[in-house]
Image (spheres, rainbow, N blue to C red):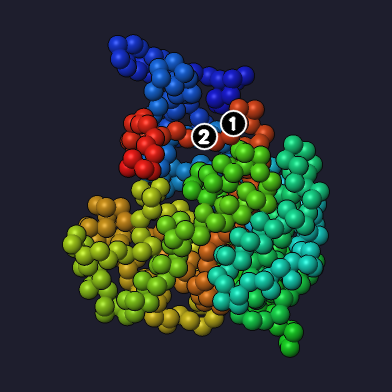
Amino acid sequence: MTIRESKAIPDGAAKLSYKGKDYDLPAYAGTEGPNVLDIRKLYSDADVFTYDPGFTSTGSCESQITFIDGDKGVLLYRGYPIDQLAAHSNFVEVCYLLLYGALPSKTEMEAFDRTVTLHTMVHEQLATFYRGFRRDAHPMAVMCGVVGALSAFYHDSTDINDPRQREIASHRLIAKIPTIAAMAYKYHVGQPFVYPLNHLGYTENFMRMCFAVPAEEYKINPVLAKALDTIFILHADHEQNASTSTVRLAGSSGANPFACIAAGIACLWGPAHGGANEAALKMLEEIGTVDRIPEFVARAKDKNDPFRLMGFGHRVYKNYDPRAKAMEIQCHAVLDELGMKDEPLLKVAMELEHIALHDDYFIEKKLYPNIDFYSGITLRALGFPTSMFTALFALARTVGWIAQWKEMLEDPHQKIGRPRQLYTGAKTRDYVPLTRR
């Protein structure tokens, strides 16, 4: 069911009594999740705003892309459970699914894959653009700047009112973001850029662009490529989180798609959003060995100790993170393939996971391991420095941002975002000249 006027199906209504008057708030039911109360006319009818810092109880839009049930530990992309997609699909197919709403046929998949492949090259002048950054610049700072600058290179796909230009921009962003991220990595480590190869798959191409050097041939390890591809799938979209909402808000003003995605990257860079896997890895390194775990668990339980176990619990999931199991499988596969079964951090991680799943404290507070618990270990084993972790997150999430941006622009009820406020500043007062103050 949809809230759009042509198909609106009321599911009862709520009554609000305010200053002696009653107001009806229509209720609507989605296909999944809680119902919503429509307050769009509340300000005009009752001269009152709702107050919801962080918008955690506010449905800011209607969407058909991703559904999360945090209590049950459910994550669906267009209705498909994330664990099924992680086990059986690949990232490019998931990109098609998120963009177009259905899994592609064989012909559609081949055409889409070919289109993405042919867009992986970036304008050669971008190489010069990179050299404007210091070598020690954070990869996310570089990606913010480069992605935002794409609108200066691709003028033929910035008209958001042209459906064909929107599609071209979408394909370009999905295709070029791995190249841009790989170039950010190469620049960061002082190595020459590596160009994409059209005969390689999406993730394989990215790994080669990151780790190949001119002096020798780079061989793709399918186990490692599968793990990274799975990471991309698991991070592709996550409903109306901070960065996705940022992309939608920027897009609501009519900003070009490259600027909108750059805004999403900037938001993702915040440590409260995209840096969780890096924080989890640093925590495991701080613990170091299994025998030190009781000390840190005790600190985590101590209300007077600011220490927190990273990688456990989630703001949305009040049950086991549905992405964590798929990530755990790939983590083990990578460590086995690389002969790192005795990796100390893995032993620490496994013991912490066991404690979290059996200790009453963790069970009562529902502090289950989340995806970040395993992804940090996996990415480090793949050879990425922690400075690249959030950049890889941005690479994967770009398709979700684009799908959400595209859906927003095609929504007939879309308006420019304009949250209101509860003003607690000074009341009206007259200006006093400087000589009288």
Is residue 432 among what the camera can see? yes
Foreground pick, 369 / 63? 63
Q: Amino acid at mark 2?
A: Arg
Quarter assignment of residue 121: bottom right
Identity of the residue drawn at 58% across and 34% down: 416
The quadrant of the rendering that contains the C terminus is top left
> Would residue 83 be found to the left or right of residue 180 on screen?
left
Rounded to the nearest angstrom, the CA distance separating label 1 from label 2 is 8 Å
Quarter assignment of residue 62: top right
Task: Indicate which label's residue lies in the foreground, 1 or 2.
Answer: 2
Location of residue 105 with respect to 221 vertically, above or below:
above
Q: Amino acid at mark 1?
A: Lys
Image location (x, y in percent) of residue 259: 65, 51
Foreground pick, 13 / 143? 143
Q: Secondary structure at mark 2?
A: loop
From the image, tell me which residue sits under label 1: 415
> Would residue 205 be found to the left or right of residue 143 on screen?
right
Quarter assignment of residue 190: bottom right
